[in-house]
Image (cartoon, grey):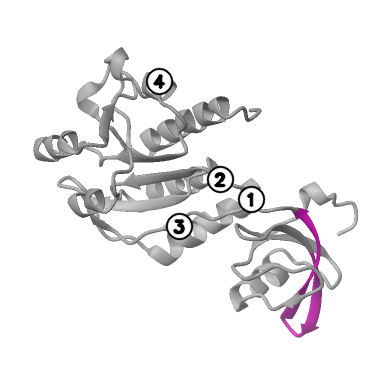
Amino acid sequence: MKGMTSRSLQRLYLAVPLISGERLDPSSDQQHYLLTVLRLKDGDQIKVFNEEDGEYLAKLVVTGRKKTALDILDQQRPAQPSHDLTLAFAPIRRHRMETMIEKATELGVTRLCPVTTAFTQNAQINHHRLSAIATEAAEQSGRLSVPVLEQPQSLHAFCSEQSGQEIIFCDEAKAGEPDHHLLAYLQASDGLLTSIILIGPEGGFSDDERRFLLDQPHANGVSLGHSILRTDTAAVLAIGLWQAIYEKKNGIQI
């Protein structure tokens, strides 16, 4: 890959220990991606990464017809401590949901939780495909981890399992109320190391669900402004605001 800088190298997520000097065998899908999609050649370099070991240079070693291994070279970035940001969302139409997963990953979400509600359009998800989309988005965005994608569960079951963690739910009933805007809420919060952002379906939460959420001791309803947003738009806006305030509060240069 002549002329390629280290910064512009392709990245590959490997969920195995990364150790300088070791040779690893990518999965069959990853080998196809490296050789057929990227059309890499013997001796070409890429970056490999995971949340435990950080990011390493690796050299492609062609070992047979459509077969390749990776020689792990020098570490480029160590593993980094991270915030814990969950996006809980009502499953929506496939194309919009895939875009939402991609953008949420790019924005640093660490856990993705499909939650079924009264107005959920489609409770089924293609877990394998959405996981692959999240992995690809992590590879392209430069982050060192891939968000965990949970199996779908009901709103009540999800809330019961959060062990007192803060749930920020985007409440259409508060649209246009400045005192309840997410930005004002985040600016007044401390730390922001662990948060759950909950986005309802198109049509919002039912009255019973909203009462249930307001009864939760660690749940807070917020507004995202005057407009009624689609689920995927609301998710990107909420995550972006959270990430910006997190970086500001923790002295991270934006």
**Which image quarter holds the C terminus?**
top right
Q: CA distance from mark 4 to mark 3?
A: 28 Å
Q: CA distance from mark 2 to mark 4?
A: 21 Å
From this view, report whether residue 225 is shown above or below residue 242.
above
Disc 2 element: loop
C-alpha distance separating marks 4 and 1: 33 Å
Q: Amino acid at mark 3?
A: Val
- Give 217 or 122, whichever is nearer the viewer: 217
How far apart, in angstroms, are the residues tagged by discs 1 and 3? 17 Å
Which amino acid is tagged 4? Ala
Q: Residue 125: image x %, image y %?
A: 33, 60
- Give the image quarter of residue 161: bottom left
Where does label 4 land, which residue? 188
Taking the spot 78% from the left edge, 49% from the top edge, the residue there is 8
Residue identified by numbered label 1: 140
Q: Give me the disc on residue 82.
A: 2
Q: Is residue 62 magenta?
A: yes
| Marks 3 and 2 close (CB-CB < 8 Å) | no
Q: Amino acid at mark 1?
A: Gln
> What amino acid type should be assigned to the residue bearing mark 2?
Ser
Residue displayed at 45% across by 46% down: 99
Tell me the mark number nearer the camera, choosing from 1 and 3: 3
Q: Which mark is residue 148?
A: 3
Q: Residue at horizontal 62%, vertical 71%? A: 16
Res. 233 visible in picture: yes
Front one among 62 and 246: 246
Label drawn at residue 179:
none
Q: Which residues are magenta?
A: 58-76
Question: Which x, y percent locates residue 52?
Answer: 61, 60
For residue 67, side relative to residue 88 (left or right) = right
The 10 Å Cα crowd at callout 1, few under 14, some 14 to 19, many 20 or more, is few
